[in-house]
Amino acid sequence: MRWDIRLDRLPAGSVVSNHDYGFWEKYRWWIFGGAFVIIVQALLIFNFIRIHLARSRAERALAKGERLKTSVLESIGKRVVVLECGGQT
């Protein structure tokens, strides 16, 4: 703004040479792109953590079930009767 004339006061169709753009005007799309990338990465990280926690809970539940099955089978010893679908021994 060499002459301190505001751009909104110029007549319509005026051509301004060597206009200095502000930071936001210069880098607006880079800022939007960077923010978009950061948001996508944050969502991916959140989803990976959620999946990891769900898998950990499932593995713990499976291990607990296996321990329970093992302890039950060890406690009953060899006194197991297997019935077929028809109920015959």
Image (tube, rainbow, N blue to C red):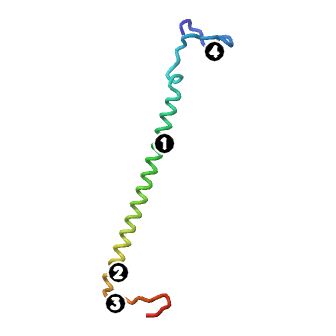
Position of residue 53 relative to residue 33, above or below, is below
Check if mark 4's residue and mark 2's residue have beta carbons within 8 Å: no
| Camera-side mark, 4 or 3 | 3
Quadrant where the C terminus sits is: bottom left
Residues packed near mark 1 inside 10 Å, few (<14), some (14 to 19) or many (20 plus): few
| Camera-side mark, 1 or 4 | 1
- Element at label 3: loop
Residue located 34% across and 81% down the image: 73
The residue lying toward the viewer, choosing from 3 and 18, is: 18
Tell me the distance, in whole angstroms, between the alpha carbons under discs 4 and 3.
95 Å
Three-letter amino acid code at disc 2?
A: Val
Please tell me the numbered disc located at residue 79: 3
Q: Earlier in the sequence, mark 2 or mark 3?
A: 2
Disc 4 designates what residue? 8
- Element at label 2: helix
Disc 2 designates what residue? 72
Residues packed near mark 2 inside 10 Å, few (<14), some (14 to 19) or many (20 plus): few
Residue located 49% across and 29% down the image: 30
Three-letter amino acid code at disc 4?
A: Asp
- Element at label 4: helix
Q: In the displayed structure, does residue 35 sit left or right of residue 60?
A: right
Please tell me the numbered disc located at residue 40: 1
**Residue extending furthest right?**
12
| Camera-side mark, 2 or 3 | 3
Position of residue 86 relative to residue 54, above or below, is below
Q: Earlier in the sequence, mark 4 or mark 2?
A: 4
| Residue 32 place in picture, x, y as percent | 52, 32
